[in-house]
Every structure is written in structure tokens, then in C-alpha cells.
Amino acid sequence: MVAVENCLLASIAPQTFKTIMHDHPDIANEVLQRLARIIRICDDRILDLSTLRAVQRVYVELLRLAQPSPLNPGSFLIRPMPTHKDVASWAGTTRETVARVMSHLAEAGVVERKDRALYIRDKARIEHLAETLDPDHESEHTR
């Protein structure tokens, strides 16, 4: 594994970990909350993989990555924009599918790529596409 930002890690023996959890309920609570978040995220991803089409999963992944723009209130962006290969891996699809989705969204003016960022011009449109995509009219939904 590779960290995406600087972090501090520790390796402790199982018995030491158990002692810390027992002696420090505040730390135990933080650990349990973090584990619960991980489980919820995994459950959501499993549900997405089993119920959504590949294109929808790409939309969902873009929405997960989107952060409010610090410069334009109400706007969203993904910075740095991961590679199509990475998005495909997270969405459980192919790089080609991601490229096709990104192309459709850009042509429709829903997103715009500048430098290493993806600016989301119409987040509501992507949310709608993620929920209601008609498999027979995939490209029409981005127009």
C-alpha cells in the first residue's frame, strides 16, 4: 500500500492494543467509529457493484471524489484528478468506460478538465445520471 498523504504509523503487539482499548475508552470509541465508517463504505461499494451499471458506478465515484471548491462556493472539483485507470479500478469497470463517461460529460458541459483538476459544473446532473441511467440512452442523458 502507498499513503496518499503524510501519516504517522505505529505497530503494536495485539496484547498492547487490547490494553490500550481497555484502559482508554476514548481511544476505543474512536477506533470503533473508524471501523464502523469503513464497514459502511464497504457496504455501499458492494451494493453499488451489485446493483449499478458500470457507467453509473463511474458517476458515483466522481461524486465521492468531488469536494467543494475553495474559490467558488456552490461549485465542486476533484483535485488532483486521478487517472482513468484508477477511477476504473475503484468503480469496478474499464479505463475505456471511464474515458467514454468523461468525454460525454465534458461534451455536455457538465465537467471541465483544467490542469490536474476536474471542475464539476453541474453536480445535480451527475447525481441524476447516477440514479436514473437508462441503459438504452446512455449518451442522451449527458446532453
Image: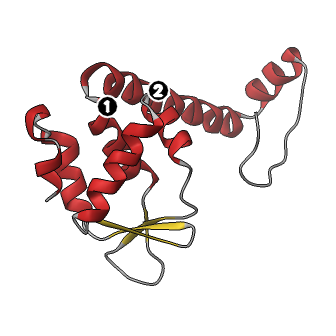
Q: Which mark is residue 14?
A: none
Q: Residues within 10 Å of mark 2 (few under 14, many from 20)?
A: few
In front here: 18 or 138?
Answer: 138
Please state, as top left, top right, bottom left or bottom right, where the C terminus lies in the image: bottom left
- In the rendered image, the residue lying farthest to the top is 15
Q: Position of residue 124 (x, y in %)?
A: 20, 60
Of discs 2 and 1, which sits in the foreground? 1
**What count of labels does the image hold?**
2
Residue that mark 2 sits on: 42
- In the rendered image, the residue lying farthest to the bottom is 71
Name the residue at 17% across, 47% down: 139
Q: Quadrant of residue 23?
A: top right
Disc 1 element: helix
Name the residue at 44% across, 28% down: 92
Residue that mark 1 sits on: 54
Look at the image and name its color scheme.
secondary structure
The amino acid beneath tag 2 is Cys
Q: Position of residue 93 (x, y in %)?
A: 42, 30
In front here: 43 or 123?
Answer: 123
Query: Is 31 positioned to the left or the right of 74 in the image?
Result: right
